[in-house]
Each structure stands twice: as C-alpha cells, then as structure tokens.
Image (cartoon, rainbow, N blue to C red):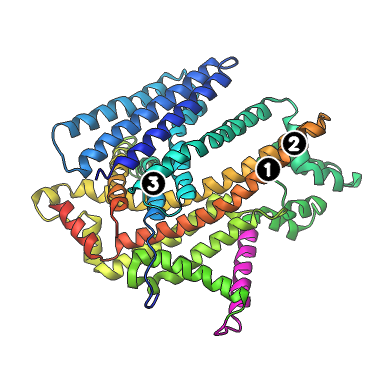
Amino acid sequence: MTGKEPKKVTGWRQVGLLSSIPFILALAPIIGFVIGQLLDRHFRTRPWLSIVLLVLGFVAGVRETIKIVKLSQRED
Amino acid sequence: MDQAGPGHDMLHRALGTSWIVALALAAAVAPGRPRDAAAILAGQLIAFLHFIFLTKIVKLFTEGRRDARLPLAITAKVALVYGGLAALIAWGGVGYVPLCVGFALPFLTLFLRSIMLALGAGPASLTTRRANETARSLGNAAKPAVLFLLLGAGALLAFSALPGAAVAGEATHGAPAAQGAPATHGEATHGEAAKHAEEGAAELPNWLVILHDFNPGNPLVGWLEKNQIIVFAWIAGLLFLLVSWLAMRKPKMVPGPFQNGVEWMVESLEDVCGGLLGPQIDKHFPLIGALFFYILTINMLGIIPGMKSATSSLDLTLALALITFLYVQYWGIRNLGIVGYLDHLAGSPRDAIGWMMLPVMLPVHILGELAKPVSLSCRLFGNIFGEDTLIVVFVGATALLIKASIVALAVPPMAGITALFMMLQTLTSIVQALIFSLLATVYLYMMLPHEAHAHEEAHETR
C-alpha cells in the first residue's frame, strides 16, 4: 500500500452494498421474530415479544437500508 | 445531479423483469394449478408494492423531507404489504411455496440485475453517465439471461413433474451405489442407494459419497461422508495453505510467474479494500485477505468433478459470518471503548427524546447489527447452493433423456448448458468471494472511527 494510489472501488462497493438490501430487509424481521419466540418461551409472554421484535425487525431493516443507500452514494 | 436516478432506473427495470417472469411462471402453472398461479401473482404484487413504498420512504428519509407524506407512506406500506400478506396467509386459500416464489421474484431479479451490472460494467460507478449507457446496453444482455432463467425454471418444473424423475436422481446420485454394490451387501446397501435416490438430484455425487457407497460398513468413511462439509472445508484450507507456502517459501526480488501471480492477486485485493479502509488496511488485511482467498478456494473446489463447495452449506457460511461479526464487534469495542460502544448501540442518545427512545433504538440497533452478518452468509450460501442445484438439474435432465433413448437430442445441448453454468460458477465464485470480503470491509469501516462517518452520525442524531 505504501506510496501507491488506492484503487477506486465505488462500483463494486455499491453492488455489494445494494445487493445486500433484499437480504437485510428480509432477515432483520426474521431474526427479530426468532429472538422474540425464544424470549416468549423463556418469559411465557407468547406472542407479545415476538410481535414487538418482529415490528422492530422491520424498523431495523428499513433503517439499515437507509444507512446502506447513504453509504453507497458516498464517493470516498 | 440526481443521485438516485440510476438506482431508480435499475430498480424499475428489475421490477419490470420480475413481472415478466411472474407472468410467464403463472402462465406455465395455470392450466394444472390455477390457485398456485394466482398465489405467484399475489406474491409478486405484494413484493412490488413493498419496493414501491420502500423507495418512497427511503427517498423521503435520504432527502430529509420528513413531512406528512412519510407517516402516510409508512402506514400505507404496513397496511397494504404486511396486512395483505397476513390476510393471504390467514385465509389459507393460497399455497405458501408459490406465494413465497412470487414474493421472492423481485428480490431475485434485483439481485441478478446488480450482479449483471457489476459483471458488465466492471467497477464503474452507478452514478455516472457511463453506467446509464451500460445499463441500456445490458438491457440486451438481460434478455438471454431471462431466457435462461425461464428455461431453467421450465426444466425444473418439467423435471419435477415427470414420473421418472426419481430414476434420474438414481442415475446422477445412486448410480455408483448400484454399480458398486455386490449382492451380498443386501438390504443395507439398497437402503443407502434408496436414501440417495430419495434425496434425488439434490447434489452431484462427490468422491466421499462414492467411497461410502463402495464401503458402506467402514466407520471412518461413514464419518467422513456424514461430515463432508467439514472435510471439504479442510481440503480447501489445506489447499490454500499449500498454495501460499509454495508461492512464498523462497521469495525472490524478481519473482517467478507463480510468486508474481499470487503477489498480484494479494496486492489487487489489498488495493481494493485499502481504497475503503485507508491506512488501517494494514491492520485488518490478514483477516479480509484470508476470508477472500479461503472462500474463493472453497467455491472453486466445487467446480472440480468429484469435489463439493463447502459454501453450499449454511453452517459454514454462518461460521464465516460469525467470525466477521465477532471481529467487527471486537474492533468496535477496542476503538470506541465499552462506554462508547454501548452508546453507539443505543443510537447515541443526547437529549430527552433520545433517552425516551432508548428501549426502541437499542433492539433496533442490535437487530441491525445481527442482520448484516446473517445477510452475508445467506447470500453466499444461496448463490453457491443455487449454482450447484442448477448444474444438478441439467445433469439430471440429461440422464433422464438418455434413459428415454433421446441421446442425440439430450447430450449436446445439455452438456453445453451445463458447461455454461460451470463457467458462470467460476465467475460467481470470484464475485461472491469478493463481495463477502468487501462487505466485511464495509461493516468494519462502519464500526471504525472515521471523520466522514462520525460527521454523518452526528448529523443523524441532530
């Protein structure tokens, strides 16, 4: 790396980042639901924690998507 | 310049393609299963609405226009997309599988579009004029790709519908068992062969399966066959170490072709990741480089007949993602300190509203952090498993046509298509390894202290 100009990788980075959006959107609520199921079983609160964490998973998915879109638009 | 323009264009094209594929699939299954066709279209419609609303929400967020339209868009999305999905599932009149297929189509086409853009345009920015031109020219390249996708789906449907499909499974997987099993082995061998035949065309037989079919009673071979993912991961690891050792055992100032090739690959990857991490790359390159070359070796191993890609198992990809996740969190704690790390996880609350939102923001942040490595592993697994399955389907279809004595019709085109998929596998092996290591770098970059990033975080909390 010493003394060399680093290559611009905007295209590859954008492809990597943008193609991860579908996975993050789908997986964040699933992870929330699974954790909610485990917590519900432990605290005997079925189905409330599953529902709450499922909704929070949707929020987390959209939030991560917004972060990814912002990051992919940056040129550095 | 409208930053979102090319991205929008790509999304709309992907959505258009997904509609074509959905309509074609629905038309293919409609004569026999009209409900499944309706379920595919319903799934496609819900996913389409999901993307339309998501585009609006992301646009309103990124442009900072948080007016009355934002809650309206969120409410409409929740009601139409999640409400519609829940209503369809609660009704029970549609099958889950066709509904999921329809729902997954826009995601799949969007993913394929982005990969095609990468392969066609190379590392070109999506925000440049060149990318627009490339996207237009890729419209032509997309047509044969969609045709291949439809052909594959058609072959899959036809293959699963044919009554002799199990015979093909036996031909592709159980054949060594049938040839190698002496009559004296009796029922045990028959059971193994039947088990493989039942598994059908899930995968091509590798040398461990063949070895096990010839030695069904050997406990060591049995153990190796049972844990073949670990064995192939070890083989890839040893191969990777051997190549590294051979290349660098006697490093020379004027390198030979082998040393030169390996150095070129390592330096290219270091340049690519260094463009993102900057001077910190020296500290993190051992892990990023190891991830890239290890995944690449594993993926390429699957192309050799008799071998298998260990990345076609979710266990291994999850393990790799877990390593990345723990590494990123470790560096997060090390750089930010335990208090700073917890502050980052809590969404950096600085005012009363921030503290009131803490119970919501903490799980949202944790779920977001967890979703990133899981998405990494699912993508790698999905791609490699999908490629392996496609090759198996075409090899299976060839075997079926040979069984039906249509050799002249079967072998040349099927062998050509299988070879084409193998070439595609080589290409995507490299792309997937690169994307895994690049995204690991991006996640690390998001966790490390960085001036621009810190500025953005501060702006977000304001």
Give residue B64's position: percent from left, percent from top.
17, 43
Q: Mark 2 touching mark 1, by CB under 8 A?
A: yes
Q: The disc numbered 3 marks a residue on which chain?
A: B
Q: In screen coordinates, is B43 left or right of B212?
A: left
> Which residue is rendered at x = 84% and y = 30% of the image?
B405
| Residue position marked by numbered label 3 in the rendering | B131
- Of residues B457 and B126, which is closer to you in this image? B126
For the residue marked with disc 3, what is the amino acid? Answer: Ala
Residue B418 is tagged as 1
Up the image or down, B323 lies above or below B104; here it is below
Q: Residues within 10 Å of mark 2 (few under 14, many from 20)?
A: many
The range drawn in magenta is: B230-254
- Label 2, secondary structure: give it: helix
Q: In screen coordinates, is B305 left or right of A58?
A: right
Q: In screen coordinates, is B57 left or right of B369?
A: left
Up the image or down, B359 lies above or below B340; here it is above
> Which residue is rendered at x = 53% and y = 23% of the image?
B24
Give residue B391's position: percent from left, percent from top.
66, 42
- Of residues B332 and B89, which is closer to you in this image? B332
> Which residue is rendered at x = 56% and y = 60% of the image?
B296
| Residue position marked by numbered label 2 in the rendering | B398
Mark sitting earlier along the chain (3/2): 3
Q: Residues within 10 Å of mark 3 (few under 14, many from 20)?
A: many
Quadrant of the frame with the N terminus of chain B:
top left
Compute the Cα span from label 3 to label 2.
39 Å
